[in-house]
Amino acid sequence: MSDLEELERARGNSEFVVTAASGSLGSLQNCEARAASNEMCTFLVMNISSLQLIPVNIIAYRGQYGSVNPAAVIAPAIVATFFSTVVAVIYCKVMGKESRM
């Protein structure tokens, strides 16, 4: 997020430019609310979509409780996270276009 904030500052976005009155961005003094950029929102949504290739915790729980095939959840987990990531990308693209209009 801090790198994306630097990018917005380099672009000249007034919400991310540090002024003498607002103090440094890293300090807790003079905190001001700023809107997140489209890139920041995309980064957050991609993290929330939980792309996970191997669900290690679920396999471990299934193994603990005596499952015959604890790794049987790998394929459904990959399919579910694939679709959640696709929906996240589509959502970010649609919302990014709406904010530009």
Image: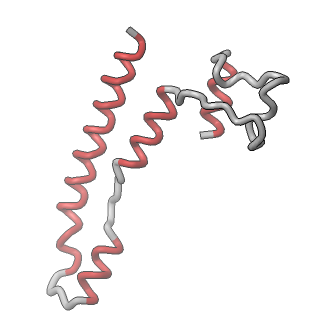
Residue at 21% from the left image edge and 53% from the top image edge = 80
| Residue 98, percent from left and from top | 35, 16
Residue at 40% from the left image edge and 43% from the top image edge = 46
Q: Is residue 1 left or right of residue 30?
A: left
Q: Is residue 69 above or below residue 36?
A: below
Residue at 27% from the left image edge and 52% from the top image edge = 81
Please identify the quadrant where the C terminus is shown: top left
**Which of the 4 image quadrants contains residue 55?**
bottom left
Residue at 60% from the left image edge and 28% from the top image edge = 34
Q: Is residue 79 above or below residue 1?
A: below
**Which of the 4 image quadrants contains residue 11?**
top right
In this view, the residue farthest toward the right is 20
> In terms of depth relative to the viewer, which is nearer, 79 or 7?
7
| Residue 75, percent from left and from top | 19, 62
Q: Is residue 82 left or right of residue 5?
A: left
In this view, the residue farthest toward the top is 101
Q: Is residue 39 left or right of residue 56?
A: right
Q: How many marks?
A: 0
> In terms of depth relative to the viewer, which is nearer, 32 or 76?
32
Protein image colouring: secondary structure
Please identify the quadrant where the N terminus is shown: top right
| Residue 86, percent from left and from top | 27, 39
